[in-house]
Image (spheres, rainbow, N blue to C red):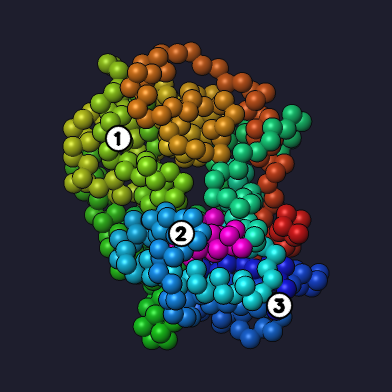
Amino acid sequence: MNKIDIMFVIIAERDAQYYYNIACKLHDSGVCCGFIIFHEPALDVIGGDSRFISILPFKGVVVNDIQYYEKKYNIRYNDIVRHEYLTYLGNINKLKNKLSLYLGMLEDFFKKNTVSCIVQELGGHIGCLSVYECAVYHGIDNYFIEPSFFKNRVLFLKNTINPLCVDLVSNRSEYVDSYVKDYISNKFVSYSSKDSHHYNKAYKKIFLFRNWKAFVYKIFNIYIKNRHIEFNSIYSYVNKYIKFIVGSFICNILGKYKNFEHVEGKKFVYFPLHVPEDFQLTTRCPEMYDQYSLLLYLASIMPNGVSLVTKEHPSMAGSFGCFKSRDILNSGLVLLSPYINNYDIINKSELIITINSKSGFEAVIQGKKVVTLGESFYSCFGLTENIAIQDLRNKILSMVERKHEVDSRLLYGFLNGIYVQSFPMSLYDNSELNINNSAKAIRSMVL
Protein backbone atom coordinates (compact mmCIF):
# COMPACT_ATOMS: atom_id res chain seq x y z
CA MET A 1 0.00 0.00 0.00
CA ASN A 2 1.40 3.40 -1.03
CA LYS A 3 1.13 6.50 1.14
CA ILE A 4 0.50 9.62 -0.96
CA ASP A 5 0.35 13.09 0.58
CA ILE A 6 -1.23 14.97 -2.34
CA MET A 7 -2.91 13.81 -5.55
CA PHE A 8 -3.49 16.34 -8.32
CA VAL A 9 -6.40 15.93 -10.74
CA ILE A 10 -5.52 16.40 -14.42
CA ILE A 11 -8.45 16.82 -16.81
CA ALA A 12 -6.89 18.91 -19.62
CA GLU A 13 -3.61 19.63 -21.38
CA ARG A 14 -2.79 22.77 -19.42
CA ASP A 15 -3.18 20.94 -16.09
CA ALA A 16 -0.43 18.44 -16.85
CA GLN A 17 2.65 20.66 -17.03
CA TYR A 18 1.46 22.95 -14.24
CA TYR A 19 0.69 20.27 -11.67
CA TYR A 20 3.75 18.25 -12.69
CA ASN A 21 5.99 21.27 -12.04
CA ILE A 22 4.37 21.78 -8.63
CA ALA A 23 4.69 18.08 -7.79
CA CYS A 24 8.40 18.15 -8.63
CA LYS A 25 8.88 21.16 -6.38
CA LEU A 26 6.96 19.51 -3.53
CA HIS A 27 8.82 16.23 -3.99
CA ASP A 28 12.11 18.06 -3.45
CA SER A 29 10.83 19.11 -0.02
CA GLY A 30 9.77 15.58 0.96
CA VAL A 31 6.10 15.59 -0.10
CA CYS A 32 4.87 12.44 -1.87
CA CYS A 33 2.63 13.37 -4.81
CA GLY A 34 0.53 11.54 -7.36
CA PHE A 35 -1.86 12.21 -10.22
CA ILE A 36 -5.43 11.28 -11.10
CA ILE A 37 -5.33 11.57 -14.88
CA PHE A 38 -8.41 11.97 -17.06
CA HIS A 39 -6.38 13.40 -19.95
CA GLU A 40 -4.26 10.60 -21.41
CA PRO A 41 -1.80 12.84 -23.33
CA ALA A 42 -0.66 14.10 -19.91
CA LEU A 43 1.49 10.97 -19.86
CA ASP A 44 3.72 12.71 -22.41
CA VAL A 45 4.60 15.20 -19.66
CA ILE A 46 4.65 12.93 -16.63
CA GLY A 47 5.96 9.95 -18.58
CA GLY A 48 7.48 7.18 -16.56
CA ASP A 49 8.61 9.42 -13.71
CA SER A 50 8.86 6.84 -10.95
CA ARG A 51 8.69 9.49 -8.22
CA PHE A 52 4.94 9.82 -8.76
CA ILE A 53 2.00 7.40 -8.62
CA SER A 54 -0.76 7.83 -11.18
CA ILE A 55 -4.21 6.41 -11.84
CA LEU A 56 -6.14 6.60 -15.09
CA PRO A 57 -9.80 6.18 -14.02
CA PHE A 58 -10.98 5.69 -17.62
CA LYS A 59 -8.90 2.50 -17.92
CA GLY A 60 -11.30 -0.14 -16.67
CA VAL A 61 -14.80 -1.55 -16.91
CA VAL A 62 -18.05 -0.64 -15.18
CA VAL A 63 -18.52 -2.95 -12.21
CA ASN A 64 -21.58 -1.45 -10.51
CA ASP A 65 -24.45 0.57 -11.97
CA ILE A 66 -25.11 4.16 -10.99
CA GLN A 67 -27.92 3.25 -8.58
CA TYR A 68 -25.36 1.39 -6.46
CA TYR A 69 -23.22 4.51 -6.07
CA GLU A 70 -26.21 6.81 -5.58
CA LYS A 71 -27.25 4.75 -2.58
CA LYS A 72 -23.74 4.18 -1.22
CA TYR A 73 -22.51 7.81 -1.53
CA ASN A 74 -25.90 9.42 -0.94
CA ILE A 75 -25.63 11.33 -4.22
CA ARG A 76 -27.85 12.00 -7.22
CA TYR A 77 -26.23 11.26 -10.55
CA ASN A 78 -28.10 14.19 -12.13
CA ASP A 79 -26.15 16.60 -9.94
CA ILE A 80 -22.84 15.21 -11.17
CA VAL A 81 -23.51 14.74 -14.89
CA ARG A 82 -25.61 17.91 -15.29
CA HIS A 83 -22.77 20.19 -16.29
CA GLU A 84 -21.53 17.95 -19.11
CA TYR A 85 -25.06 17.10 -20.20
CA LEU A 86 -26.01 20.76 -20.57
CA THR A 87 -22.67 21.96 -21.92
CA TYR A 88 -22.16 19.30 -24.57
CA LEU A 89 -25.72 17.98 -25.00
CA GLY A 90 -24.30 14.60 -24.05
CA ASN A 91 -26.00 11.21 -24.07
CA ILE A 92 -27.31 10.73 -20.54
CA ASN A 93 -26.71 6.96 -20.50
CA LYS A 94 -23.11 7.37 -21.61
CA LEU A 95 -22.57 10.01 -18.95
CA LYS A 96 -24.04 7.72 -16.27
CA ASN A 97 -21.76 4.88 -17.37
CA LYS A 98 -18.75 7.19 -17.33
CA LEU A 99 -19.59 8.27 -13.79
CA SER A 100 -20.00 4.65 -12.67
CA LEU A 101 -16.66 3.73 -14.26
CA TYR A 102 -14.82 6.61 -12.61
CA LEU A 103 -16.30 6.00 -9.17
CA GLY A 104 -15.48 2.29 -9.35
CA MET A 105 -11.87 2.84 -10.42
CA LEU A 106 -11.31 5.60 -7.86
CA GLU A 107 -12.87 3.58 -5.06
CA ASP A 108 -10.60 0.65 -5.83
CA PHE A 109 -7.53 2.91 -5.85
CA PHE A 110 -8.41 4.63 -2.59
CA LYS A 111 -8.92 1.27 -0.88
CA LYS A 112 -5.47 0.06 -1.95
CA ASN A 113 -3.56 3.28 -1.21
CA THR A 114 -3.46 5.80 1.61
CA VAL A 115 -4.15 9.26 0.21
CA SER A 116 -4.09 12.32 2.47
CA CYS A 117 -5.71 14.87 0.18
CA ILE A 118 -6.79 15.80 -3.34
CA VAL A 119 -6.04 19.14 -5.04
CA GLN A 120 -7.89 20.22 -8.19
CA GLU A 121 -9.33 23.25 -9.93
CA LEU A 122 -12.99 23.90 -9.15
CA GLY A 123 -15.17 22.58 -11.95
CA GLY A 124 -18.39 20.79 -12.76
CA HIS A 125 -17.12 18.03 -15.04
CA ILE A 126 -17.72 14.40 -14.16
CA GLY A 127 -14.02 13.79 -13.60
CA CYS A 128 -13.76 16.59 -11.02
CA LEU A 129 -16.96 15.76 -9.17
CA SER A 130 -16.43 11.98 -9.14
CA VAL A 131 -13.04 12.48 -7.47
CA TYR A 132 -14.61 14.89 -4.98
CA GLU A 133 -17.50 12.59 -4.03
CA CYS A 134 -15.33 9.48 -3.80
CA ALA A 135 -12.62 11.24 -1.79
CA VAL A 136 -15.01 12.71 0.76
CA TYR A 137 -16.74 9.35 1.19
CA HIS A 138 -13.40 7.69 1.95
CA GLY A 139 -12.36 10.39 4.41
CA ILE A 140 -9.87 12.06 2.07
CA ASP A 141 -9.82 15.86 2.11
CA ASN A 142 -10.59 17.43 -1.27
CA TYR A 143 -9.35 20.98 -1.94
CA PHE A 144 -10.89 22.84 -4.85
CA ILE A 145 -8.89 25.82 -6.13
CA GLU A 146 -11.08 28.79 -7.05
CA PRO A 147 -9.73 32.09 -8.44
CA SER A 148 -10.16 34.90 -5.95
CA PHE A 149 -11.67 38.34 -6.56
CA PHE A 150 -8.06 39.58 -6.58
CA LYS A 151 -6.00 38.87 -9.68
CA ASN A 152 -3.46 36.05 -9.40
CA ARG A 153 -4.73 34.96 -5.99
CA VAL A 154 -6.82 31.88 -5.23
CA LEU A 155 -9.01 30.44 -2.51
CA PHE A 156 -9.07 26.82 -1.36
CA LEU A 157 -12.45 25.18 -0.76
CA LYS A 158 -12.12 22.22 1.60
CA ASN A 159 -14.63 19.41 1.05
CA THR A 160 -17.27 21.62 -0.55
CA ILE A 161 -18.24 23.10 -3.89
CA ASN A 162 -20.04 26.01 -2.24
CA PRO A 163 -18.53 29.51 -2.16
CA LEU A 164 -16.18 30.23 0.70
CA CYS A 165 -17.68 32.50 3.36
CA VAL A 166 -14.59 34.35 4.54
CA ASP A 167 -14.02 35.89 7.96
CA LEU A 168 -14.15 39.67 8.18
CA VAL A 169 -10.78 41.34 8.81
CA SER A 170 -10.84 44.83 10.29
CA ASN A 171 -7.22 45.79 9.55
CA ARG A 172 -7.07 47.75 6.30
CA SER A 173 -4.68 46.44 3.67
CA GLU A 174 -2.79 48.82 1.39
CA TYR A 175 -3.08 46.25 -1.38
CA VAL A 176 -6.87 46.12 -1.06
CA ASP A 177 -7.17 49.91 -0.98
CA SER A 178 -4.97 50.18 -4.07
CA TYR A 179 -6.91 47.43 -5.87
CA VAL A 180 -10.24 49.17 -5.31
CA LYS A 181 -8.81 52.53 -6.40
CA ASP A 182 -7.46 50.93 -9.58
CA TYR A 183 -10.89 49.42 -10.30
CA ILE A 184 -12.60 52.78 -9.88
CA SER A 185 -10.05 54.63 -12.02
CA ASN A 186 -9.57 51.97 -14.71
CA LYS A 187 -13.20 50.78 -14.70
CA PHE A 188 -12.08 47.19 -15.07
CA VAL A 189 -11.46 44.16 -12.87
CA SER A 190 -9.16 41.41 -14.08
CA TYR A 191 -9.82 38.27 -12.08
CA SER A 192 -7.56 35.69 -13.69
CA SER A 193 -5.12 35.47 -16.58
CA LYS A 194 -5.86 31.81 -17.36
CA ASP A 195 -8.98 32.55 -19.44
CA SER A 196 -8.04 35.93 -20.93
CA HIS A 197 -8.01 34.51 -24.48
CA HIS A 198 -11.78 33.89 -24.24
CA TYR A 199 -12.43 37.65 -24.33
CA ASN A 200 -11.85 37.96 -28.07
CA LYS A 201 -14.79 38.76 -30.30
CA ALA A 202 -16.62 35.67 -31.55
CA TYR A 203 -15.42 35.84 -35.18
CA LYS A 204 -11.82 36.52 -34.12
CA LYS A 205 -11.68 33.22 -32.25
CA ILE A 206 -11.69 31.47 -35.64
CA PHE A 207 -8.37 33.07 -36.51
CA LEU A 208 -6.59 32.44 -33.21
CA PHE A 209 -3.64 30.09 -33.71
CA ARG A 210 -4.07 28.60 -30.25
CA ASN A 211 -7.65 27.50 -31.08
CA TRP A 212 -6.56 25.78 -34.31
CA LYS A 213 -3.65 24.20 -32.47
CA ALA A 214 -6.02 22.84 -29.80
CA PHE A 215 -8.43 21.57 -32.48
CA VAL A 216 -5.69 19.68 -34.37
CA TYR A 217 -4.24 18.41 -31.09
CA LYS A 218 -7.55 16.88 -30.05
CA ILE A 219 -8.28 15.38 -33.48
CA PHE A 220 -4.81 13.83 -33.57
CA ASN A 221 -4.97 12.35 -30.07
CA ILE A 222 -8.54 11.08 -30.28
CA TYR A 223 -8.65 9.67 -33.81
CA ILE A 224 -5.01 8.94 -34.67
CA LYS A 225 -3.49 7.94 -31.33
CA ASN A 226 -6.79 6.63 -29.88
CA ARG A 227 -6.22 8.39 -26.57
CA HIS A 228 -8.75 9.36 -23.94
CA ILE A 229 -9.42 13.08 -23.70
CA GLU A 230 -11.96 14.27 -21.16
CA PHE A 231 -12.92 17.35 -23.20
CA ASN A 232 -13.62 15.36 -26.35
CA SER A 233 -16.83 17.03 -27.54
CA ILE A 234 -15.07 18.71 -30.45
CA TYR A 235 -18.06 19.07 -32.72
CA SER A 236 -20.22 20.40 -29.90
CA TYR A 237 -17.64 23.15 -29.32
CA VAL A 238 -17.39 23.96 -33.02
CA ASN A 239 -21.17 24.03 -33.42
CA LYS A 240 -21.55 26.27 -30.37
CA TYR A 241 -19.04 28.85 -31.57
CA ILE A 242 -20.46 28.89 -35.07
CA LYS A 243 -23.83 29.73 -33.49
CA PHE A 244 -22.15 32.47 -31.47
CA ILE A 245 -20.62 33.97 -34.59
CA VAL A 246 -23.92 33.85 -36.48
CA GLY A 247 -25.82 35.18 -33.48
CA SER A 248 -23.41 38.04 -32.97
CA PHE A 249 -23.44 38.92 -36.68
CA ILE A 250 -27.25 38.94 -36.94
CA CYS A 251 -27.69 40.89 -33.70
CA ASN A 252 -25.32 43.52 -35.10
CA ILE A 253 -26.92 43.60 -38.56
CA LEU A 254 -30.49 43.79 -37.23
CA GLY A 255 -29.57 46.40 -34.64
CA LYS A 256 -30.51 44.24 -31.67
CA TYR A 257 -27.37 45.31 -29.85
CA LYS A 258 -27.97 48.79 -28.44
CA ASN A 259 -25.39 51.42 -27.60
CA PHE A 260 -25.12 52.72 -24.07
CA GLU A 261 -26.70 56.01 -25.16
CA HIS A 262 -29.95 54.07 -25.59
CA VAL A 263 -30.40 53.89 -21.80
CA GLU A 264 -28.21 56.70 -20.52
CA GLY A 265 -30.24 59.18 -18.52
CA LYS A 266 -33.09 56.67 -18.04
CA LYS A 267 -34.03 54.53 -15.07
CA PHE A 268 -33.05 50.91 -15.55
CA VAL A 269 -32.35 47.68 -13.71
CA TYR A 270 -29.31 45.72 -14.87
CA PHE A 271 -29.16 41.92 -15.11
CA PRO A 272 -25.74 40.79 -16.42
CA LEU A 273 -25.97 37.48 -18.26
CA HIS A 274 -23.82 34.64 -17.03
CA VAL A 275 -21.60 32.63 -19.32
CA PRO A 276 -23.93 29.91 -20.68
CA GLU A 277 -23.30 26.54 -19.04
CA ASP A 278 -21.13 28.22 -16.43
CA PHE A 279 -20.31 26.10 -13.35
CA GLN A 280 -21.91 28.84 -11.24
CA LEU A 281 -25.24 27.97 -12.87
CA THR A 282 -25.06 24.29 -13.79
CA THR A 283 -23.62 23.11 -10.48
CA ARG A 284 -23.96 25.81 -7.86
CA CYS A 285 -27.34 27.19 -8.84
CA PRO A 286 -29.03 24.84 -11.36
CA GLU A 287 -32.52 26.12 -10.53
CA MET A 288 -31.50 29.42 -12.20
CA TYR A 289 -29.98 27.78 -15.27
CA ASP A 290 -32.67 29.03 -17.69
CA GLN A 291 -31.67 32.68 -17.97
CA TYR A 292 -34.12 33.30 -20.83
CA SER A 293 -37.14 32.46 -18.71
CA LEU A 294 -35.68 34.50 -15.88
CA LEU A 295 -35.29 37.52 -18.17
CA LEU A 296 -38.90 37.21 -19.33
CA TYR A 297 -40.05 37.14 -15.72
CA LEU A 298 -37.89 40.10 -14.71
CA ALA A 299 -39.12 42.13 -17.69
CA SER A 300 -42.72 41.42 -16.66
CA ILE A 301 -42.28 42.82 -13.13
CA MET A 302 -40.40 46.02 -13.95
CA PRO A 303 -42.09 49.11 -12.46
CA ASN A 304 -43.50 51.73 -14.84
CA GLY A 305 -40.79 53.92 -16.27
CA VAL A 306 -38.02 51.44 -15.46
CA SER A 307 -36.33 49.35 -18.16
CA LEU A 308 -34.62 46.00 -17.80
CA VAL A 309 -31.14 46.01 -19.34
CA THR A 310 -28.87 43.04 -19.99
CA LYS A 311 -25.77 42.16 -21.93
CA GLU A 312 -23.86 39.01 -22.74
CA HIS A 313 -20.58 38.20 -21.09
CA PRO A 314 -17.93 39.61 -23.49
CA SER A 315 -16.29 36.19 -23.84
CA MET A 316 -19.61 34.75 -25.10
CA ALA A 317 -20.86 37.39 -27.53
CA GLY A 318 -23.58 35.91 -29.72
CA SER A 319 -24.68 33.37 -27.10
CA PHE A 320 -27.94 35.20 -26.44
CA GLY A 321 -29.45 33.64 -29.54
CA CYS A 322 -30.76 35.96 -32.23
CA PHE A 323 -33.87 33.88 -32.87
CA LYS A 324 -34.61 32.65 -29.36
CA SER A 325 -34.38 36.21 -28.09
CA ARG A 326 -37.30 37.55 -30.13
CA ASP A 327 -39.96 37.17 -27.42
CA ILE A 328 -37.64 38.55 -24.76
CA LEU A 329 -36.72 41.63 -26.76
CA ASN A 330 -40.40 42.24 -27.54
CA SER A 331 -41.03 42.29 -23.79
CA GLY A 332 -39.18 45.58 -23.51
CA LEU A 333 -35.78 44.22 -22.54
CA VAL A 334 -32.81 46.25 -23.76
CA LEU A 335 -29.90 44.15 -25.01
CA LEU A 336 -26.70 46.19 -24.87
CA SER A 337 -23.57 45.45 -26.86
CA PRO A 338 -21.43 42.89 -25.01
CA TYR A 339 -18.40 45.14 -25.41
CA ILE A 340 -19.77 48.08 -23.44
CA ASN A 341 -17.81 48.54 -20.25
CA ASN A 342 -19.54 46.74 -17.39
CA TYR A 343 -18.47 49.46 -14.96
CA ASP A 344 -20.43 52.16 -16.81
CA ILE A 345 -23.63 50.11 -16.95
CA ILE A 346 -23.44 49.30 -13.25
CA ASN A 347 -22.67 52.91 -12.39
CA LYS A 348 -25.78 54.27 -14.14
CA SER A 349 -28.21 51.57 -13.02
CA GLU A 350 -30.79 51.93 -10.25
CA LEU A 351 -30.43 48.31 -9.18
CA ILE A 352 -28.43 45.23 -10.16
CA ILE A 353 -30.09 41.82 -10.10
CA THR A 354 -27.77 38.85 -10.45
CA ILE A 355 -27.80 35.15 -9.77
CA ASN A 356 -24.29 34.88 -8.34
CA SER A 357 -21.95 36.58 -10.82
CA LYS A 358 -18.88 38.65 -9.95
CA SER A 359 -20.61 41.62 -11.61
CA GLY A 360 -22.79 41.76 -8.52
CA PHE A 361 -19.77 42.29 -6.34
CA GLU A 362 -18.40 44.94 -8.69
CA ALA A 363 -21.71 46.71 -8.10
CA VAL A 364 -21.27 46.40 -4.32
CA ILE A 365 -17.87 48.07 -4.59
CA GLN A 366 -19.49 50.91 -6.53
CA GLY A 367 -21.99 51.32 -3.72
CA LYS A 368 -24.98 50.14 -5.75
CA LYS A 369 -28.04 48.19 -4.61
CA VAL A 370 -27.68 44.52 -5.45
CA VAL A 371 -30.18 41.66 -5.37
CA THR A 372 -28.73 38.14 -5.48
CA LEU A 373 -30.96 35.23 -6.44
CA GLY A 374 -28.40 32.52 -5.66
CA GLU A 375 -25.60 31.87 -3.21
CA SER A 376 -22.35 33.70 -3.95
CA PHE A 377 -19.08 34.49 -2.22
CA TYR A 378 -20.33 37.99 -1.34
CA SER A 379 -23.95 37.27 -0.39
CA CYS A 380 -23.52 36.28 3.26
CA PHE A 381 -22.55 39.56 4.92
CA GLY A 382 -25.48 41.92 4.38
CA LEU A 383 -23.82 43.69 1.45
CA THR A 384 -26.63 42.50 -0.83
CA GLU A 385 -30.35 41.74 -0.68
CA ASN A 386 -30.77 37.97 -0.98
CA ILE A 387 -34.31 37.53 -2.26
CA ALA A 388 -36.15 34.43 -3.43
CA ILE A 389 -37.35 34.78 -7.01
CA GLN A 390 -41.03 34.40 -5.99
CA ASP A 391 -40.73 37.37 -3.59
CA LEU A 392 -39.10 39.72 -6.07
CA ARG A 393 -42.33 40.95 -7.69
CA ASN A 394 -43.54 42.51 -4.43
CA LYS A 395 -40.19 44.10 -3.60
CA ILE A 396 -38.84 45.35 -6.91
CA LEU A 397 -40.45 48.82 -6.76
CA SER A 398 -39.24 49.55 -3.22
CA MET A 399 -35.78 48.25 -4.14
CA VAL A 400 -35.54 50.59 -7.12
CA GLU A 401 -36.74 53.66 -5.21
CA ARG A 402 -34.93 53.06 -1.93
CA LYS A 403 -31.92 55.18 -1.03
CA HIS A 404 -28.79 53.16 -0.49
CA GLU A 405 -25.41 53.68 1.10
CA VAL A 406 -22.88 50.88 1.39
CA ASP A 407 -21.33 50.18 4.79
CA SER A 408 -17.69 50.84 3.90
CA ARG A 409 -16.39 49.25 7.11
CA LEU A 410 -18.26 46.04 6.31
CA LEU A 411 -17.19 46.16 2.66
CA TYR A 412 -13.51 46.61 3.43
CA GLY A 413 -13.68 44.05 6.22
CA PHE A 414 -14.95 41.58 3.65
CA LEU A 415 -12.38 42.56 1.00
CA ASN A 416 -9.57 42.29 3.53
CA GLY A 417 -10.93 38.89 4.54
CA ILE A 418 -10.77 37.64 0.96
CA TYR A 419 -7.25 38.95 0.59
CA VAL A 420 -5.96 37.47 3.85
CA GLN A 421 -7.54 34.05 3.20
CA SER A 422 -6.40 33.85 -0.42
CA PHE A 423 -2.99 32.78 -1.69
CA PRO A 424 -0.69 34.34 -4.30
CA MET A 425 -0.76 31.88 -7.18
CA SER A 426 -2.13 31.83 -10.71
CA LEU A 427 -3.49 28.65 -12.24
CA TYR A 428 -1.49 27.29 -15.19
CA ASP A 429 1.22 29.93 -15.10
CA ASN A 430 4.42 27.88 -15.34
CA SER A 431 6.88 30.65 -14.53
CA GLU A 432 9.38 29.71 -11.83
CA LEU A 433 8.04 32.37 -9.47
CA ASN A 434 4.44 31.16 -9.78
CA ILE A 435 5.38 27.48 -9.42
CA ASN A 436 7.26 28.35 -6.22
CA ASN A 437 4.28 30.35 -4.95
CA SER A 438 1.84 27.59 -5.92
CA ALA A 439 3.85 24.87 -4.20
CA LYS A 440 4.21 27.01 -1.07
CA ALA A 441 0.49 27.86 -1.01
CA ILE A 442 -0.63 24.26 -1.49
CA ARG A 443 1.77 22.94 1.13
CA SER A 444 0.75 25.53 3.71
CA MET A 445 -2.95 24.98 3.02
CA VAL A 446 -3.28 21.21 2.81
CA LEU A 447 -0.42 19.76 4.88
Say which of marks 1 and 2 sits in front. 2
Sequence-earlier tag: 3 or 1? 3
Judge by depth and name the residue closer to the eye, 321 or 84: 84
| Spot occupied by residue 256 in the image (x, y as percentages of width and height) | 23, 39
Stretch in magenta: 122-138
Where does label 1 land, which residue? 295
Up-down: is 80 above or below 48? above
| Spot occupied by residue 83 in the image (x, y as percentages of width and height) | 40, 56
- Residue 19 in view of the camera: no
Where does label 3 land, which residue? 2
Name the residue: 61% across, 21% down.
Answer: 407
Determine the secondary structure under disc 1.
Answer: helix
Label 2: few (<14), some or many (≥20) within 10 Å?
Answer: few
Name the residue: 44% across, 65% down.
Answer: 68
Q: What's the residue type where badge 2 is placed?
A: Lys
Residue 239 sits in which quadrant? bottom left
Marks 1 and 2, Cα distance to the nearest angstrom? 37 Å
Up-down: is 259 above or below 132? above
Residue 437 sits in which quadrant? bottom right
Label 1: few (<14), some or many (≥20) within 10 Å?
Answer: some
Sequence-earlier tag: 1 or 2? 2
Marks 3 and 2, Cα distance to the nearest angstrom? 29 Å
Name the residue: 41% across, 65% down.
Answer: 66
Where does label 2 land, which residue? 71
- Residue 88 in view of the camera: yes
Q: Does the residue at mark 3 contact the one at mark 2 (Cβ under 8 Å)?
A: no
Name the residue: 64% across, 52% down.
Answer: 158
Marks 3 and 1, Cα distance to the nearest angstrom? 53 Å
Number of numbered callouts drawn? 3
